[in-house]
Each structure stands twice: as structure tokens, then as C-alpha cells.
Image (cartoon, rainbow, N blue to C red):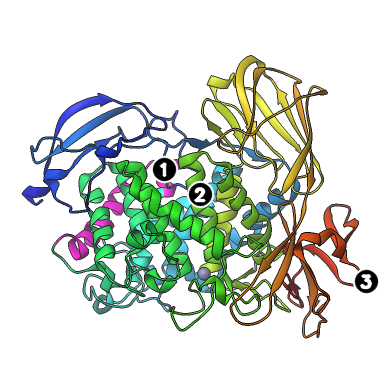
């Protein structure tokens, strides 16, 4: 170890554990990496069973005795603090409804399909190198992530065995120097550090999958294997070594996604060298003119710039910044993530919640963010990996801030873009979807996207109920149940109804012993609460500063809250620089779309009719719900029916979500 990187423990301090804020003067001015400038506080590892692991396996709620570590004996010029998650997910069971149906589809079908399909492709690249495809190695890490969360949900013993077997086989494939990719020796990241390949990417996902598994199934061998991977990366791309931004694609944005995985390893081990490496990756990125993600986001530039605007990977880098914020307390990391989120939300999201991308002269390819002026609903694609990472980014931000808007955006993406990409037999997924397309390209094949989508279903499901600010928080109103922690009297809470179908949700307390605490819920997106009753009595509620409705009282068995709401019909207009204006419609959290037959020629009902979005109700009429559940509208004076976007497409049908006018 370099003497400059040695640390000595100087102070023990017990810190507040939640919402810990830094004074402005505590912020480092530059990411110099100078150890003399660094003092940090690290936690005891968050290994206490009372600490709930983050549902996606990447953000931990850290608490306990904190240790201040001064660098190289230097006086503490500034402090870096571990930020506790504000909003922490609680284990829950889904109790029927659309989300449970879709999660079950994956857990009963594709989850098992992946183990044997395509000649054991998921592990073959490791066990018989070289692999056949440049990013063949990513799938096992993604599977371990999603399947670990599925096992937590189902407690399926057979799945537990398969998880363990998969991890064993992966560990066996690791080489003595830590290498755990699928490339031939001459092509590996440590033999050709400037290669434009996906070898670092594979290790990013192996770290992710292994560390997620290990969080629920403690195993020192898995930690050691992860450390060996990271040490090989450090030995190749660390301080004074090769530049990681010259590896991978688009100024290294594919390789710098490893930032999040390295921070997960730091969260698990608290080994200084991993945090130092993470910060080194940031510095390399900021020094690469084509990347500069943090610099661009802090200046509120558009996401179509950094790394060629590669949507999936740009958002995956932001996940790493979220963890850096959590483990350093440096607000600029959070600002980077939040500014990126704002830009994506305002300019790069279909009403389906899917981040759209489109190839233009100024970006890399069709998977890259394009300027909003280049919106085109049939030309722009949503990569399911992008939808997944957007959902993940929102869930991280919910954990770090407790703000309802992040839960709402995750939910919109799940109910619309994500569910549209999953075929309803449980195996097939779409790589790309488009808002307007005349069929959906479902496929049983192993693709990056088919391996990503289930992760989003699992992550979101684990975030429907949580703890925030001393109370219980419902981030979604989907039917679920949970047994609350000891601090809440171990009460059992049940959310009933059929959300997002229907217009009433119930919350029931069972086995509650009169403990006094707060319960909060988030109203559906684009909806109006019409009544909230406790045990039949109307109550008036105001949203709190995080966007939730909060009720404090002593809860007894049999207590119930009934929430009635009314979805609002809204029009959403896009006005690209060239070409027609477009309008799409939403009804509460549902994006609406017309089902299009493959190859059909469709008329434009609004062209030349003086359409105005402010008068949406004059153009649409409500019809009896589809199957008695999902909403339906007719465009007046036409036979065009609008249904939820996720129900609109199949192998022979597609969706028209945006209409010209
Ligand atoms: Zn993909």
C-alpha cells in the first residue's frame, strides 16, 4: 500500500444516524484526491440485523458507532460523513393486483428459464472462456440481483439452492488474480487497459450480483472474491495507472458504471482503498472531455452530452454518485444526481415513464439521450435497461430524500414502460419499445434488457412500504401487507383494493396494540383525493413537505383508513423543432394508448381540428373499464379507443401513444 494512502484512526464519534447534514464549510473544494485534505467518518458496517438492507442491494441504511479516520496523520481540515438513508424499505408481501401478477410472472417463469436456456449461456462464458458475446458476462450478476430479491420475497427453498449453486460456480470460475470475466487472456481489461470492450462492465455486474447475494446470505468467500475483483481493477486503473475512461465505450461511460459496484464494496468492507478508487474514477471522468458527467450535471447541462448521452450507462453512473453522496456526505454528489434527474424528468421521458433516446448527429447511437427538440415518438426508443435504471435511480433518491415525487416517477415507469416491455406469458421481454409502434418486439432471448427488467420489478416491489421520519410510509398504494418493526408494535398492516385499477384503497391494521405512530401515504400521480376516512369518519389532510399525507395516532387492531380518489385526465404536448406537434393522454398514473394492428394504416383524428390540450375532456369520452378494471376512453366521433399503454401491444399489435395535431 502506498504510504500516502495509509490512514490512522484518530477519533471515535457517535453521530446522528438519519438525515445528517453537512455544513457548507465542510465541503471539499476540489476532488484533488490529496489525502492531506481528507477526513472521513465511516460506520461500523451496517451489519446489524436491525438494519434493513436496501431493497436493490446497493444503498444501506447505515447507523451505529462512527469512526473518524484522519489521513496520514494530518489535521482534520474537513469532515466527510456517512448519510443515513431517510426512507428505508420494509419487507412486505404483495397481495394480488397488477404488480403482484407481473412479479409472479418473472418469479415463476423467466427466473428459471435463465438457468438452462441457450445452452447455459449465463455461466458458459465464465466456465468455458472466451464467451461468445462481448457482454455475455453481465447476465449472471443481473440474475443474482433479481433472484436474490425474489428469494427474499418467496423464501423458495429450491431457489435458495439455485442461488447458492450459481454463486459457487461463479466463484470457481474466478482466476487467482481476481479476474472474473468472459474474455480470452489477451483481450482482458488488465492486459489491454485501453480496449473498447465490455470486460470492466462484466465485473461491474458480478460485483453487483455477488454483493447483493452476500448481503442476504453472509459469506466471507464472496466478499473476498469481490475484493479480488476490485483489487485487480485498482491495480489496472488506480492512481498512476491506466485511465479507466479509455476503456469501454463513449469516453469510458460504460466502464465508469463500476463506480456504484465499488461503492457497494466499500459499504460492505469499509476498506479505504475502495473509496479512494471510487473517487479516482470520478476524477478520471471529470478529466475526460467527452465524459465530465458531474461537471455537466452541476452546471445543469443536458444529459445528451456526457458519454455521448448513452442513456442506460449515464443513469447507471448516477447510481454511483448517489452512493458516493451517502458515504462521503458531499452534497455535490447528490446535486449531480438530482440535477441529472431533473433534466431527464423534464426533457427525456415519455408519458409512459420510459426514458427515450434517439440517434442524432450530436450523440452516439439510438440508445443515447437526444435533445427534447428531436422528440419523435416512433423514431425514439426506450431501452428496457434505461427504464430499469431510471426506476432504480428514483428509488435511490426516495431512500436518500424521502420525497414522494421519486416514488411517483418510479411507479409511472413500472406501470407503463416496464410492464409494456414484459410479455404476459412470463418469459419474453422487449429490448426496445417505442411510444408509437405497430407491434412489440418481444423475444425469449437473453438480452441486456430482458435481464434488467425483472430487477426493476423486484426493486419497486420492495419499496412499496417503508419507514421514514419515525413513521410508516406507503410509497405506492398497491395491495400489500407487512409486519411492522418492533418500534411500531409489530402491528400487521394491510393495503387493500386493486390499485392502480379502481378508485378506492383501504389500509387496515391487524394485530395492532394501540401504539402511537405516524402513517403516511402518497396519493396517486395526477389524481385528486376525494375523501379520506378513518374508521368511517372523514378527516382533512394536508401534504407534508415531502409530498405525503401523514396521520399520527394510536393504531388498534381493526382500525382502517379508506382513501377515495379520482384520476385526472391530462394531455401532454411535445413540440419538436421539426415536424408536427404531438399530444398524448394520461389518466392518473396510466399512460393511455390506442392498440394498433401490425401493418395497419391509421388516421390522425386531431390533425386540422384545432386541438387544444387544455380542453382534453372535450375530445375524449370515458367508456366502461376494460375487463371491469382498466380505464378506457374513446376519442369522440371516432372508433379509436384508448387503453393503458402496457396493455396495448403484443406480437401482432402495437401502440399509438402520441397523436399528431
Ligand atoms: Zn438493454
Residue bearing the label numbered 3 = 637
Residue 71 lies in quadrant: top left
* Whether residue 611 is situated above or below residue 503 in the rendered picture: below
Marks 2,3: beta carbons within 8 A: no
Is 213 a magenta residue?
yes
Q: Where is residue 587 in the image (x, y as percent from the top left)?
A: 76, 55
Can the viewer see residue 458 in this picture?
Answer: yes
Q: How far apart are marks 1 and 2 (CA)?
A: 9 Å
Q: Residues within 10 Å of mark 2 (few under 14, many from 20)?
A: many
In the rendered image, the vertical position of residue 143 relative to residue 164, given as above or below = below
Q: Which region is colored magenta?
A: 212-239
Is label 2 or label 3 in front?
3
Disc 2 target residue? 148
> Could you tell me how far apart the alpha carbons at marks 2 and 3 are, in whole angstroms?
51 Å
Q: Are marks 1 and 2 in contact (CB under 8 Å)?
A: yes
Front label number (1 vs 3): 3
Residue at point 90%, 67% (across, down): 636
Where does the image place residue 607, in percent across and percent down from the top left?
Answer: 79, 79
Element type at mark 2: helix
Q: Report the residue marked by disc 1.
A: 215
Residue ranking furthest to the top: 514
N-terminal label among 1 and 2: 2
Q: Is residue 639 above or below residue 273?
A: below
Residue at screen point 58% across, 63% down: 349
Q: Earlier in the sequence, mark 2 or mark 3?
A: 2
Amino acid at each position: 500500500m502506498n504510504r500516502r494512502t495509509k490512514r490512522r484512526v484518530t477519533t471515535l464519534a457517535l453521530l446522528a444516524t438519519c438525515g445528517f447534514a453537512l455544513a457548507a464549510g465542510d465541503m471539499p473544494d476540489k476532488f484533488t484526491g490529496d489525502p492531506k485534505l481528507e477526513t472521513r467518518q465511516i460506520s461500523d458496517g451496517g451489519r446489524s440485523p436491525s438494519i434493513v438492507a436496501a431493497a436493490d442491494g446497493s444503498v444501506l441504511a447505515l447507523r451505529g458507532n462512527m469512526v473518524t479516520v484522519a489521513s496520514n496523520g494530518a489535521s482534520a481540515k474537513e469532515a466527510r460523513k456517512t448519510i443515513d438513508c431517510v426512507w428505508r424499505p420494509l419487507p412486505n408481501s404483495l397481495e394480488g393486483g397488477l404488480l403482484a401478477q407481473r412479479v409472479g410472472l418473472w418469479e415463476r417463469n423467466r427466473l428459471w428459464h435463465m438457468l438452462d436456456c441457450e445452452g447455459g449461456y449465463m455461466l458458459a462464458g465464465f466456465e468455458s472462456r472466451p464467451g461468445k458475446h462481448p457482454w455475455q458476462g453481465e447476465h449472471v450478476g443481473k440474475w443474482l440481483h433479481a433472484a436474490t430479491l425474489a428469494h427474499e420475497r418467496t423464501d423458495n427453498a429450491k431457489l435458495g439452492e439455485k442461488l447458492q449453486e450459481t454463486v459457487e460456480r461463479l466463484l470457481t470460475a474466478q482466476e487467482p488474480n481476481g479476474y472474473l470475466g468472459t474474455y480470452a487472456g489477451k483481450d482482458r481489461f488488465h492486459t489491454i487497459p485501453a480496449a473498447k470492450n465490455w470486460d470492466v462492465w462484466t465485473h461491474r455486474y458480478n460485483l453487483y450480483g455477488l454483493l447483493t447475494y452476500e448481503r442476504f446470505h453472509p459469506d466471507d468467500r464472496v466478499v473476498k472474491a469481490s475484493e479480488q475483483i476490485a483489487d485487480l481493477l485498482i491495480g489496472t486503473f488506480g492512481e498512476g495507472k491506466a485511465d479507466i475512461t479509455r476503456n469501454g465505450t463513449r469516453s469510458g461511460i460504460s466502464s465508469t458504471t463500476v463506480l456504484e459496484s465499488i461503492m457497494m464494496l466499500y459499504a460492505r468492507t469499509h476498506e479505504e482503498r475502495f473509496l479512494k478508487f471510487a473517487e479516482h474514477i470520478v476524477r478520471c471522468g471529470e478529466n475526460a472531455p467527452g465524459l465530465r458527467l458531474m461537471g455537466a450535471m452541476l452546471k445543469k447541462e443536458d444529459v445528451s452530452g456526457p458519454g455521448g448521452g448513452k442513456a442506460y450507462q449515464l443513469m447507471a453512473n448516477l447510481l454511483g454518485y448517489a452512493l458516493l453522496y451517502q458515504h462521503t456526505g458531499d452534497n455535490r454528489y447528490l446535486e449531480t444526481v438530482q440535477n441529472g434527474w431533473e433534466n431527464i424528468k423534464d426533457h427525456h421521458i415519455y408519458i409512459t415513464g420510459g426514458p427515450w433516446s434517439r440517434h442524432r448527429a450530436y450523440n452516439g447511437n439510438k440508445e443515447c439521450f437526444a435533445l427534447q427538440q428531436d422528440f419523435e415518438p416512433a423514431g425514439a426508443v426506450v431501452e428496457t435497461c434505461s427504464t430499469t435504471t431510471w426506476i432504480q435511480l428514483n428509488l435511490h433518491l426516495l431512500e436518500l430524500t424521502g420525497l414522494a415525487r421519486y416514488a411517483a416517477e418510479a411507479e409511472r415507469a413500472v406501470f407503463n414502460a416496464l410492464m409494456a416491455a414484459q410479455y404476459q406469458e412470463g418469459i419474453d421481454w422487449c429490448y426496445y419499445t417505442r411510444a408509437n409502434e405497430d407491434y412489440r418486439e418481444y423475444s425469449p432471448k437473453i438480452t441486456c434488457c430482458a435481464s434488467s427488467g425483472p430487477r426493476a420489478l423486484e426493486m419497486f416491489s420492495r419499496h412499496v412500504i417503508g419507514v421514514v421520519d419515525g413513521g410508516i410510509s406507503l410509497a405506492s398504494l398497491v395491495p400489500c401487507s407487512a409486519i411492522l418493526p418492533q418500534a411500531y408494535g409489530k402491528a400487521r398492516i394491510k393495503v387493500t383494493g386493486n390499485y392502480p385499477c379502481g378508485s378506492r384503497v383501504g389500509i387496515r391494521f391487524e394485530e395492532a396494540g394501540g401504539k402511537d405512530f405516524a402513517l403516511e401515504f402518497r396519493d396517486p400521480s395526477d389524481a385528486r383525493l376525494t375523501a379520506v376516512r378513518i374508521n368511517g369518519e372523514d378527516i382533512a389532510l394536508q401534504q407534508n413537505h415531502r409530498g405525503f399525507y401523514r396521520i399520527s395516532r394510536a393504531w388498534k387492531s381493526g382500525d382502517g383508513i379508506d382513501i377515495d380518489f379520482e384520476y385526472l385526465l391530462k394531455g401532454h404536448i411535445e413540440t419538436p423543432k421539426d415536424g408536427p406537434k404531438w399530444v398524448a393522454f394520461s389518466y392518473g398514473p396510466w399512460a393511455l394508448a390506442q392498440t394498433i394492428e401490425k401493418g395497419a394504416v391509421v388516421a390522425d383524428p386531431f390533425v386540422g381540428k384545432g386541438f387544444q390540450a387544455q380542453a382534453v375532456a372535450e375530445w375524449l369520452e370515458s367508456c366502461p373499464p376494460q375487463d371491469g378494471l382498466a380505464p378506457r376512453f374513446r376519442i369522440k366521433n371516432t372508433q379509436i379507443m384508448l387503453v393503458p399503454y402496457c396493455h396495448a401491444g403484443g406480437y401482432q399489435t402495437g401502440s399509438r401513444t402520441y397523436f399528431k395535431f
